[in-house]
């Protein structure tokens, strides 16, 4: 199975994964807001829920009011199919939900 490759992540964006706890992303998001006017939290597939939790925690932990905007969508990725017993090899498309939450200082 191929891993989703994320390219061109900006300094003011957080790409949430399942490898780190929520508090790591919250701290990073609060640090981004010290130097930028906005932070964007992104999640794909099983990390959509985590991205929402991170955005909520950043909003409640920030000392000023934040304007929230949200975009949802679907990403397409390819999954390798390797069946050594039957000799079938190939790939198939997999659709995954995605979310992008922007928190902007008012």
Image (tube, helix red, strand yellow):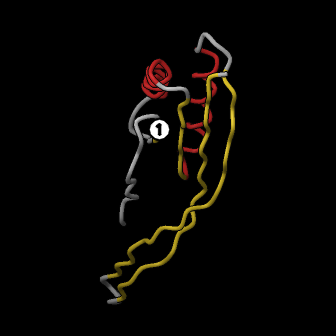
Q: Residue furthest top?
A: 63
Q: Quadrant of residue 28?
A: top left
Q: Is residue 63 above or below residue 55?
A: above
Given residues 4 and 38, the one toward you in this image is 38
Residue found 62% across the figure and 28% down from its top: 104
Look at the numbered disc 1 and give the secondary structure of its residue: strand
Residue 35 rendering spot, x and y as whole percentages: 44, 21
- Where residue 30 appears, as percent x and y from the top left, is 49, 20
Query: In this figure, which residue is indicated by the disc labeled 1?
Result: 13
- Residue in the image at 54% along x and 37% along y: 40
> Residue 96 at what x, y percent from top left?
57, 60
Vertical order, 88 against 57 (above or below):
below
In this rendering, the count of numbered labels is 1
Which residue is at 62% across, 23% downward?
105
Crowding at dot 1, Cα within 10 Å, few <14 / some 14-19 / many 20+, comes out as some
As drawn, is 8 to the left or to the right of 69?
Answer: left
Q: Based on the displayed image, in which of its 4 quarters is residue 75 positioned?
A: bottom right
Q: Position of residue 9 (x, y in %)?
A: 40, 45
The quarter of the displayed image where residue 61 is located: top right
What quarter of the picture does the C terminus occupy? top right
The correct choice, above or below, for 39 with respect to 61 in the image is below
Question: Which residue is more in the foreground, 74 or 40?
Answer: 40
Q: Quadrant of the N terminus?
A: bottom left
Q: Residue at x 46, y 34 (%)?
A: 12
Residue 13 located left or right of residue 55: left
């Amino acid at each position: 199975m191929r891993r989703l490759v994320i390219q061109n992540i900006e300094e003011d964006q957080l790409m949430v994964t399942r490898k780190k706890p929520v508090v790591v992303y919250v701290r990073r998001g609060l640090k981004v807001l010290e130097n930028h006017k906005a932070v964007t939290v992104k999640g794909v597939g099983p990390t959509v829920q985590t991205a929402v939790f991170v955005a909520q925690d950043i909003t409640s932990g920030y000392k000023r009011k934040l304007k929230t905007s949200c975009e949802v969508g679907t990403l397409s990725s390819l999954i390798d199919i390797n069946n050594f017993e039957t000799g079938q090899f190939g790939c198939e498309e997999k659709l995954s939900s995605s979310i992008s939450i922007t928190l902007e200082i008012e």
